[in-house]
Amino acid sequence: MLKYVLNRVKSSLVILLVVSMITFFVLMIIPGNPAQLILGTDATAEAIEDLRIAMGLDRPYYQQYLGWLLDLLKFDLGTSYIYGEAVTSLIIRAIPVTFSIAVFAMLIATITALFFGILSAVKKDSIIDYFSRSIMQLGTAIPSFWIGMVFIVYFGLRLKWFPISGFVPISSSFAGFLKSIALPAIVLAIGETGTLLRIVRSSMLDSLKQDYMDAARIKGLNKWKIYMKYALRGALIAPVTIIGMQFAKLAGGTVVVETIFALPGIGRLVLTAVERRDIVLLQGLVMFITTTVIFITLMVDLLIMTINPRIKSVERGE
Amino acid sequence: MNETVVLKNLHIKDGKNTLVSNTSLTIEKGDIYGLVGESGSGKTLTAKAIINLLPEGLKFTADEINVAGKNILKASQNEVTMYIGKNAGYIPQNTVFFLHPMIKIKNQIADGYVHHMKRSKAEGLKISLQLLDMVGFENPESILNFYPWQLSGGMRQRVNIAMALMNNPAFIIADEPTTALDSTVQKQVMELFKKINGDTGISILLISHDLSLIKHYCLKIGVMYAGQIVESGYSKDIFENPKHPYTQLLIKMMPTMNIKKNEPIPEIKGFVPEKGRDSQGCLFKERCPFAMDVCGISVKEHNDSGHYYRCNLY
Ligand SMILES: Nc1ncnc2c1ncn2[C@@H]1O[C@H](COP(=O)(O)OP(=O)(O)OP(=O)(O)O)[C@@H](O)[C@H]1O
Ligand SMILES: [Mg+2]
């Protein structure tokens, strides 16, 4: 187990190194002089050149990269041109926003998908199954920006149940925090529930056909005990994998929803960095998102190892 | 009450398609009853109908299904589930996924016992240790801590046997219990059944392709063809004096080979028919060397003091 984790961490570091090179050099090639961007169009050529040298941008690319990489190891992602602030602190400030809505969205999506997915598999072709299948269709078909708008207009402006923009930190008011993330989380959840529900349903249907269900039935156990202990257990791997992927996607920032609800999260930071050509910020964000995704994937793989112990021994080469 | 199982006139359908028809069998207390037939002849479905385990989507009718003294056709679904769970055991054809692959043996073997006997899991595990010992494990405690896939096929099958015996049932079905095993293990498992049968007087329905195995272990047998029992009775009577041409052919080729799964029998041309099993005529007609015109229309049933066969030759 430990050996497996260490191996995975090793390969993750290699991936990160490769990603860091790609981001660094790709962003370097993009036209535009950062010094010019900072000083504006009025600045003299000399002033721009001085700043360029001060920023170390006159050095060869590989030297710049090594310098950046060394800083990265010290968790120093440089200073954003546009905010004039350390990229690390900008990201740290955005994390709670993005993670809160990602976690809540996935909680809502998971609970809904498990509930309807299990029921619709167990009661295949019943009313509840048709209902679940409509959820699948709708969830995947409706664009999240549209749902977001509708929610803002209806629940935010008309009913005034929820604030329509901004983020209230959990430390200042828990109720306020919940209210501020409720709408965006629901909007995101709607986008993910359909896919997840489909996976839960089909895995359950498959699991219900397995021989171990015969074994459970011949024991004469209670129906729901059979479903929850035997069928669900056999059906968890695919949904957990998907939940992990969905969570990783949301945790990397959700540009559309964060923009609609004016939430200062990772997605908005990415958008600003791209719009205003803040290369240092963008590099830092790409590294952060990559690390997050790799970390979540690793966690999911470990979780799946505990669900399906067989993978454990196969990976170990037993 | 001397019969553990009475099955009368079973029909199983998949929508409009008949899979099993006119099938009856009786298993006396303490007997090992052998059900033999080619792949697809309906052995597993017949067995599953007896223990209320038919796959979803299949419909059955029967005049009577009596297990250990209770006509389960007259009971509610919940009652049947409880009753069968308590009084019958099932040992599967395929051992790979019968035990749940993601759950340790100790967390699944005693479920039924705990449920039916209203005892604690610890007590259940105590019983399972005794049974695992009985089915020949030298170190039962360690088996409990394994996942099923960590065991060999023969070991898994012995765990299945122990699990089927947990509630001390009156009746177990062993559905080709040894097909997946190599020949030495096959012999061990079969001897184990014989021993359990001798020690506890449990009735066993033994399903197999292998006529020589059935001949060796069973007092009574039924020969299945295309979803019907075409001949049944005491093993001795059938082997000495087979009536149905199908049985005769099976016995003739017996010393040379067993019936292999999904392979046509070379000396009997053609395949087991999948369609038209609801015909009133003889289903073996197409492959029968003695087929007559009448065989397509109807078939005579005979019963010579317990030796049953359906054929127009007599
Ligand atoms: N769930 C099902 N739905 C539809 N048809 C089925 C189903 N299960 C079995 N059958 C069909 O019923 C027939 C009898 O199947 P059964 O499994 O009882 O055969 P068997 O005698 O046990 O064969 P084998 O020796 O291969 O185990 C076969 O033609 C099979 O295709
Ligand atoms: Mg079978």
Image (tube, helix red, strand yellow):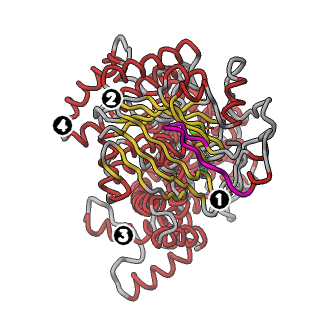
Residue at mark 2: C-beta within 8 A of ligand 2: no
Vertically, is B109 above or below B257? below
Circle 1 crowding by C-alpha within 10 Å: few under 14, some 14–19, many from 20: some
Which sits earlier in the primary sequence, circle 1 or circle 2? 1
SS at circle 2: helix
Label 1: chain letter: B
Regarding ligand 2, which quadrant of the image does it lie in? top right
Q: Residue at x 39, y 51 (%)?
A: A227
**Label 3: which secondary element:** helix
Q: Which residue is mark 1?
A: B17
Where is residue A292 shown, x and y percent of the image?
50, 44
Q: Earlier in the sequence, mark 2 or mark 4?
A: 2
Single out the mark in the foreground, 2 or 3: 2
Q: Which residues are magenta?
A: B297-309
Res A180 label: 3
Label 4 CB less than 8 angstroms from ligand 2 = no
Q: Is residue A6 visible?
A: no
What kind of residue is marked 3?
Ser
Q: Quadrant of residue B166?
A: top left
Identify residue for label 2.
Answer: B106
**SS for callout 4:** loop
Q: Is residue B177 left or right of residue B198?
A: right
Alpha carbon separation for disc pair 4 and 3: 51 Å
Residue B301 is a magenta residue: yes
